[in-house]
Image (cartoon, rainbow, N blue to C red):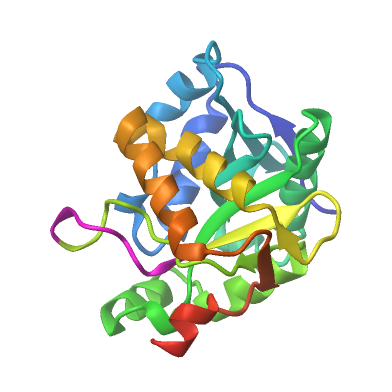
Amino acid sequence: MPPTIRRVTDTHDPALSAFGRIQEASYYDPEMLIPAHYFGQMIGDQGGERQNVILVAEDGGEVVGGTLFHLLPSGAGFSSFMGVALAARGSGAARALHTARMQVIREAGYAGVFADAVHASALSADDLAAEVRVGSDPLLRRVKLNALGFGTVNAPYWQPVGGPDGGPLTDLDLLYCPLEPSNSVPLALVTETLRAYWQSWLGPQRAAHEAQALAQRTGSDPVALLPATQRPEVFAANP
């Protein structure tokens, strides 16, 4: 049987630190993720437009996986992280977590959930070696995301900060999993979701500017969804 899934609502629940340890152990660059010591504060601070959700997968009372995602005023969610402990991979935990996440999306009346993920072709040799050290495979990850229903948003996406010398981080692609199957996503849903997601660390003005810049770079509405195994066309053509 796959692990059981539950939503964590107690800010002092020990499952938060257990999930944090899985996050740190299972991602090749944990410094890029939200530190676990913020988890309690995030699920306790639900007074604004942004609602933070943590689900954990448990097997026999032991946390074996989890996901952190955000319900945003755009009408979509954004997943910051989903991971499963190495020993629990293949147990169905990831699919169970995603199914529960999409149920939260459905109950909120939202359209779907966004995420971003690296592509093997965009990683350096050092990053690829780091993936191997934590037992992960970026190619297989994108295959699994595709199987869960995610598609690559065919847009020239990058995170405005987090790259070399504090500049944009360009090795991530934006993915989207619609609640109802679709081969495209409205451009306004993309940009409004990112504006709301970026606002917490960029501030309202910069987040709005970056979202508008993405809209101008994209130039199509709606935006096509490609298989999640692919990069956006602009990056695939100019690796």
Q: Residue at point 39% right, 79% down? A: 122
Q: Residue furthest top?
A: 47
Residue 111 versus residue 142: which sits nearer the camera? 111
Please state the horizontal and vertical placement of residue 127, each as a whole percent of the image: 32, 75
From the top left corner, tell me how far across and down residue 186 is, in percent: 68, 52
Q: Is residue 42 above or below residue 137?
A: above
Q: Which residues are magenta?
A: 165-172
Is 215 a magenta residue?
Answer: no
Q: Quadrant of the C terminus?
A: bottom left
* Residue 227 placement, left or right of 115: right
Above or below, 43 relative to 152: above
Q: Position of residue 46 (x, y in %)?
A: 55, 15
User: What predominant SS class does the magenta segment belong to?
Assistant: loop
Q: Where, quadrant-wise, is the N terminus in this rendering?
A: bottom right
**Location of residue 119 in the rendering, given as x and y in whole percent from the top left corner:** 48, 75
Residue 203 visible in the current orientation: no
* Residue at the spot 53% in from the left edge and 64% down from the top edge: 219
- Which residue shows up at 13% across the image and 58% down it? 165
Tell me if 236 is positioned left or right of 169 in this view.
Answer: right
Query: Foreground residue, 58 or 179?
Result: 179
The verdict on residue 166 being magenta is yes
